[in-house]
Image: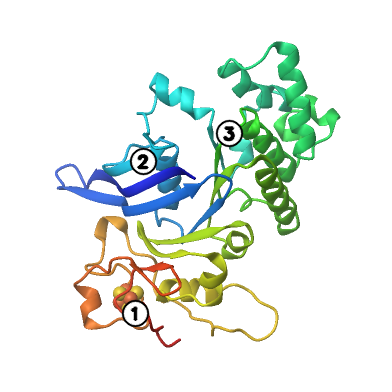
């Protein structure tokens, strides 16, 4: 069942350059359509500035789309700050990259985890205390750590506490924005395993936003690759990582460290991602694309479904035939 559906969603901002400068429209997200299924994980990947965090905020109703629709359980997402939206918020939670920034340094870990229960009027004081204790066990924290303050825990322990708080209201949807990027590699694996175990046990839908393709591959049931606000490739992670079709996905996948010989030769992209305020014409990837043709500079490629069911936005991607590496 589709829990969350984004259809042709765009988010535009108006910026002004200088005091007398003309205003410019910047489209952080442009024409994206996504489905998040109950109990499954959607991975969203791309370089910094590609619009993946804005997509997460649109999914939670923290941002209103400029165009298109966001449906949660087939109902339109209420406007942020309204009573309806606040009631829905307990069913949708966000986990940030920086656990220290997401926590109140004056509160103990137990108080932080209890906070959403108080906000949403859930349980009596003793029921809440019981629930907080159970949540801390679920995320692998010890009972004595409940009375500590955020700065007294390690980064991994803080992220576990943030997760306990996100799970407190029994959400149907968890949006995790770079949840392990700030952690040591050895701790990342532990937190990712815990996240996937909890998600499977509780049947939560998860959106896992990251620039780290290796982690996204590990946790996701489907993956969307974003470039400059648009989805360029989307589908089953096994097929997408084994045989990426879009030249941008090929470059990202080719950069994943692997032991032994590579299946896909390393593709080094030249140049930085373009400025969303100065978007290239046609395919936004064309100034960096190693296989661009004349048409790419003038015509925006639309997503088309390939023979294996994945969607790809590239003029050279043919449903029945793959491009040469
Ligand atoms: Fe490259 Fe053209 Fe495909 Fe864009 S449409 S990814 S520029 S080949």
Q: Which residue is mark 3?
A: 171
Report how far apart the C-alphas of labels 2 and 1 lie in the structure.
Answer: 30 Å
| Image point (21%, 46%), residue name | 18
Q: Are marks 1 and 3 in contact (CB under 8 Å)?
A: no
Of labels 2 and 1, earlier in sequence is 2
Question: Of the numbered discs in the image, which one, if any, rests on residue 70?
Answer: 2
Is residue 112 shown above or below 267?
above
Q: Is residue 74 above or below residue 295?
A: above
Q: Height in image: 257 above or below 124?
A: below
Label 2 C-beta lies within 8 Å of the nearest ligand 1 atom: no
Cα distance, mark 1 to mark 3? 40 Å
Q: Could you say whether the residue bearing mark 1 is in a helix, strand or loop?
A: loop
Q: Earlier in the sequence, mark 2 or mark 3?
A: 2
Q: Earlier in the sequence, mark 1 or mark 3?
A: 3
- Tell whether circle 1 marks a residue whose Cβ is less than 8 angstroms from ligand 1: no
Residue placed under numbered mark 1 in the picture: 318
Q: Position of residue 223 (x, y in %)?
A: 50, 60
Q: Is residue 131 above or below residue 175?
A: above
Relative image position of residue 242 (x, y in whole percent): 56, 76
Task: Specify the color scheme.
Answer: rainbow
Name the mark on residue 41. none
View quadrant of ligand 1: bottom left
Quadrant in the picture for residue 111: top right
Q: Position of residue 270 (x, y in %)?
A: 41, 76
Residue 16 visible, this angle: yes
- On the question of residue 287 being in view, the answer is no
Q: Nearer the viewer, residue 253 or 148?
A: 253
């Amino acid at each position: 069942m589709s829990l969350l559906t984004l259809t042709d969603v765009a988010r535009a901002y108006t910026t002004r350059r200088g005091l007398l400068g003309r205003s410019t429209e910047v489209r952080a997200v442009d024409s994206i359509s996504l489905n998040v299924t109950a109990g499954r994980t959607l991975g969203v990947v791309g370089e910094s500035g590609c619009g993946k965090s804005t997509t997460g905020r649109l999914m939670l109703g923290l941002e209103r789309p400029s165009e298109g629709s966001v449906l949660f359980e087939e109902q339109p997402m209420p406007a942020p700050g309204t009573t309806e939206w606040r009631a829905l918020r307990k069913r949708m939670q966000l986990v940030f990259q920086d656990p220290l920034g997401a926590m109140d340094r004056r509160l103990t870990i137990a108080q932080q985890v209890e906070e959403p229960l108080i906000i949403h009027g859930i349980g009596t004081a003793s029921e809440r205390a019981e629930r907080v204790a159970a949540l801390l066990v679920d995320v692998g924290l010890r009972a004595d750590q409940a009375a500590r303050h955020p700065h007294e825990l390690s980064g991994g322990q803080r992220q576990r506490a943030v997760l306990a708080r996100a799970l407190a209201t029994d959400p149907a949807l968890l949006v995790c924005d770079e949840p392990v990027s700030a952690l040591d590699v050895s701790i990342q694996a532990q937190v990712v395993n815990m996240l996937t175990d909890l998600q499977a046990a509780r049947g939560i839908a998860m959106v896992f936003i990251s620039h780290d393709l290796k982690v996204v591959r590990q946790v996701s049931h489907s993956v969307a690759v974003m470039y400059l606000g648009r989805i360029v490739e989307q589908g089953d992670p096994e097929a997408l990582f084994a045989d990426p079709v879009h030249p941008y996905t090929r470059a990202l996948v080719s950069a994943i460290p692997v032991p032994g010989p590579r299946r896909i030769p390393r593709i080094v992209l030249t140049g930085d991602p373009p400025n969303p305020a100065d978007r290239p014409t046609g395919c936004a990837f064309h100034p960096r694309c190693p296989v661009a043709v004349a048409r790419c500079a003038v015509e925006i490629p639309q997503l088309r479904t390939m023979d294996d069911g994945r969607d790809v936005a590239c003029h050279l991607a043919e449903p029945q035939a793959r491009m040469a590496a």
